[in-house]
Structure formats: structure tokens, C-alpha cells
Amino acid sequence: MAFKSLISNNAKSDIQEAIFWYNDQQDELGKKFLQFVNKKISDLCITPGIGSIRYDNVRCTMVKAFPYIIHYTINKQSKQIIILRVLHAFRKPIW
């Protein structure tokens, strides 16, 4: 049975900020970024353990074709993937 995803407000803001930035660089690039993020989140719902544990049981996995890392946790009891942040891979973490 697949897990459900829960995207935090911080992660939603991260994604929206990246979409705006990519759209400023090239028309429709933000849309492509969102498609890749959604695909990775769908993959996580099917195979939650694909990301490696980085800190405090927070797992990380890269977004294909974009330098962004999805930070997430797994709640096995509620069968949820909780997306905490979607951060640029080369920026210093903000938490």
C-alpha cells in the first residue's frame, strides 16, 4: 500500500520560490521544476526509503534534473511521507 504525502507550509514556500525563480530564467521552466518535484514525491510515496538519513531521522533525496533536495520524514504508523523542506543543494541550510 502506498504512503500519502503531506507537504509542510515551509516546503510549499520553498517550491513556490523556486518556481518563480526558474520562470524568471526561462518561460515554463518553473512548471517543469514542479513536475520533477511532484514525480519525486510520488516515487517517495511508493518507496519511502529511497532517500538517505541525513540527520535526526530526516531523509534527503535529490530532485532529478534540478539541484534541489527534498528533506522528509516517514511516519510508518499513519503511512505518511512528510515533506519538510525543498532546498537548493548548494545553499547553506536555513534551519
Image (cartoon, rainbow, N blue to C red):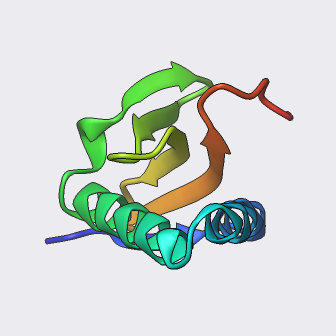
Whole-percent x, y for residue 68 in the image? 53, 42
Whole-percent x, y for residue 4 in the image? 37, 74
Whole-percent x, y for residue 32 in the image? 41, 70
Residue 39 in the figure: left or right of residue 17: left
Q: Is residue 60 above or below residue 5?
A: above
The total number of labels drawn is: 0
The residue most toward the left is: 1
Q: In which quadrant of the rendered image does the N terminus lie?
A: bottom left
The residue most toward the right is: 94
Q: Give the residue displayed 41% in from the left and 38% down from the top.
A: 62
Q: Give the residue displayed 19% in from the left and 62% down from the top.
A: 46
Q: Is residue 77 above or below residue 51?
A: below
The residue most toward the front is: 26
Q: Give the residue displayed 47% in from the left and 35% down from the top.
A: 60
Residue 20 in the figure: left or right of residue 33: right
Q: In which quadrant of the rendered image does the C terminus lie?
A: top right
Q: Is residue 14 above or below residue 88?
A: below
Q: Give the residue displayed 45% in from the left and 46% down from the top.
A: 66
Residue 2 in the figure: left or right of residue 30: left
Give the camera-side residue of 75 and 89: 89
Image quadrant assignment for residue 8: bottom right
